[in-house]
Image (cartoon, rainbow, N blue to C red):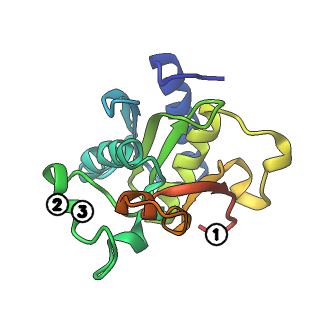
Amino acid sequence: MAKQATLEAAERVIEACKKRAEEIGTPMSVAVADAGANLVAFARMDGTLLAATVVAQNKAVTAVEFQMATRDMTPMVQPGAALFGIQAVGGGRAVAFGGGIPLTDEGGRVVGGVGVSGGSPEEDHDVAAAGAAAFRPRPAAWALPGSLATSPCSATPTRAAAATGSRSWWAAVTPTSATCSATA
């Protein structure tokens, strides 16, 4: 099990992503970033759209910087939501749709991120989940049915922090508990 996003671990993540992308028949770009959101490894499968190169890297960075799956950000960036407009911050690198997943160590600390692009947001998330599972395999008891069997559990945004009297708006929108979801 990996404790940080080393080159060896990143290559394992990329191989798992490539395998899953081949299974679904969609070429993808895959990026792995470390805990500082620095690119560790990257691969672009033959036939992948050129735009997917940048998007995959941005998804990996977003997963690290926000410490959540990029698909979990979608409701938070809608008009009127707490993070509306956040995509413009940091040079527009934040991505708020599926395909970026944080890589965590055994203690649940974010030590990197995987970003995948080339298919639909759902396909990108599915492929990234395969890579995240290769980074830190989950106990069999946590497996979900069907194609999500290798998907890692992801943090679900809650407002629990706000209920505890936290004064930080960020604490009110960031993950506070880990849950498994069978929805894509």
Judging by the rendered image, the residue that carries numbered circle 1 is 183
- Quadrant of the image for the N terminus? top right
Look at 54% across and 69% down and name the residue there.
163
Task: Return the x and y of residue 86 as percentages of the image width and height.
Answer: 24, 62
Look at 54% across and 35% down and name the residue there.
109
Mark 3 and mark 2 in contact (Cβ < 8 Å)? Answer: yes
Evaluate whether residue 84 shows in this view: yes
Q: Earlier in the sequence, mark 2 or mark 1?
A: 2
Q: Marks 1 and 3, Cα distance to the nearest angstrom?
A: 25 Å
Task: Return the x and y of residue 28 as percentages of the image width and height.
Answer: 42, 47
Q: Badge 2: few (under 14), some or many (20 or more) residues near its Cα, within 10 Å?
A: few
| Residue nearest the observer in this picture, 15 or 134 | 134
Judged from the image, the secondary structure of the residue bearing numbered disc 1 is: loop
Residue type for callout 3: Ile
Report the label total: 3
Residue type for callout 1: Thr
Judging by the rendered image, the residue that carries numbered circle 3 is 86
Judging by the rendered image, the residue that carries numbered circle 2 is 88
Occupied quadrant, residue 144: bottom right
Q: Which of marks 1 and 3 is nearer the N terminus?
A: 3
Image position of 18 (left or right of 58)? right
Image position of 103 (left or right of 70)? right
Q: Marks 2 and 3, Cα distance to the nearest angstrom?
A: 5 Å
